[in-house]
Amino acid sequence: MIERPDDRTPDTVLSALTHDALSARQAADLLGVNERTIRRAIAHGRLRATKRSGVFRIDKQELDRYRPAPFMSRSVSERLSHPLTLLPKAPAQPPYHVPRPLTPLIGREREVHAIGDLLTGDNVPLVTLVGPGGIGKTRLAIDVAAHVRDAFADGVWFVDLSPLRDHRLVSATICQAIGIREVVGRPATDRLRDFLEQQQVLLLLDNFEQVVSAAPDIAAVLAACPGLTMLVTSRVPLRLSVERQYPVPPLPVPAPAEIHDLD
Ligand SMILES: Nc1ncnc2c1ncn2[C@@H]1O[C@H](COP(=O)(O)OP(=O)(O)OP(=O)(O)O)[C@@H](O)[C@H]1O
Ligand SMILES: [Mg+2]
C-alpha cells in the first residue's frame, strides 16, 4: 500500500502511483502539467512511451527522468517525496532498422515536427511524402523516423522498395526486411498481418511509385493492424482513403548573404 506522499496530492495521482505504467492523463496530473504537454513530449521524443489500443502508456521510470520545463529541476519522486519506482529495470530498446544519415539535415525542422505529429496522433495510420525525384522525400522520412522512434514500442523498419518492379512482391519484401519467416502456403500479406496485428510499429516504405498497384494490400494490412503506422515516400500518391498526403516542398534557396557565409 502506498502512503499518501503529500496531503495536497489528488486522488487521481494516488491511483496513478499504484500502477506500473501511466496514461498521458495520469502523467500530466502527477506532474501538474497539461495533458498536451505530455503528448507533445512523447511526440518529440523527450518522453518515452508505448501505445496500446490508441492509449499511451508511460513507464514510471521514464516519467521520473523527464523534466517538463527547465524550472522543474526536481524529479517527480523528489517533488512527491516518494519514489515512483521501487525496482529499477533497464528498458529494452525496440528494434530500429533505419539507415543513418551521414550528413546533417538542412532546413526541414518544421516538416519533421509536422509529419511527426501526424504519425504520433490518433487518426492517421499512413502518411505519404509526395514529390518529384531528388526533392528530399527519403532523407526527410529518415529524420522523421529518428524523431518519433520512441512512440513505437515494437520498432521501426525502413523497407527499400526501389529495386522492385512487380507490385505483387511488396508484402514479401516487407516480410523479408522485418525478418518474418516464410510459411509454406501462407501468402506474404497474411504473414505480415499475423506478425503486426498486435504490434506498435512504424514502417517506412521507400520509393513506392513503381509498385503503386500494391496500395490495396497496404490498406488491408493497415486495416487489420491497429497499432501499425506507415510513412511512405513516393513520387505519386497511393490514393487510399486512410492516406494523408504530405507534399514535400523544395528547400528554400539561401539568400546571397548566406551563400557568402558558406565560403
Ligand atoms: N534537407 C536535406 N538536408 C540534407 N541533405 C538532403 C536534404 N534533402 C535531401 N538531401 C540529399 O539530397 C539527395 C536527394 O534526396 P532524396 O534521396 O531524399 O530525394 P527523394 O525525393 O527521395 O528522391 P527519389 O524520388 O529519387 O527517391 C540525397 O543525397 C539526400 O541526402
Ligand atoms: Mg527517395
Image: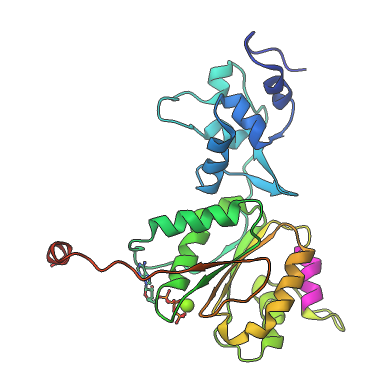
Q: Residue at x 74, y 77 (%)?
A: 217
Chief secondary structure of the magenta span? helix
Task: Please name the residue shown 13% across and 62% down the image.
Answer: 257
Residue situated in front as seen by the camera: 218 or 67: 218
Position of 88 with respect to 233 (left or right) is right
Residue stretch rendered in magenta on the structure: 189-196
Q: Nearer the viewer, residue 173 or 238?
A: 238
Residue positioned 82% across, 81% down in the render: 187
Q: Could you say where residue 229 lies in the image, as x and y percent from the top left?
A: 65, 61
Looking at the picture, does residue 219 appear above or below residue 56? below
> Which color scheme does this rendered protein use?
rainbow
Dividing the picture into quadrants, the one containing residue 56 is: top right
Quadrant where the C terminus is found in the figure: bottom left
Q: Is residue 88 visible?
A: no
Q: Residue at x 67, y 72 (%)?
A: 240
The quadrant holding residue 80 is top right
Q: Quadrant of the N terminus?
A: top right
Q: Residue furthest right?
A: 185
Residue 81 in the image, given as x and y percentages of width and height: 58, 15
Q: Nearer the viewer, residue 18 or 109?
A: 109
Image location of residue 176, percent across then percent down? 68, 77
Q: Name the foreground residue: 253 vs 134.
A: 253
The answer to whether residue 95 is seen in the rendering is yes
Q: Position of residue 193 (x, y in %)?
A: 78, 69
> Residue 194 appears in which quarter of the rendering?
bottom right
* Left or right: 163 in relation to 89: left
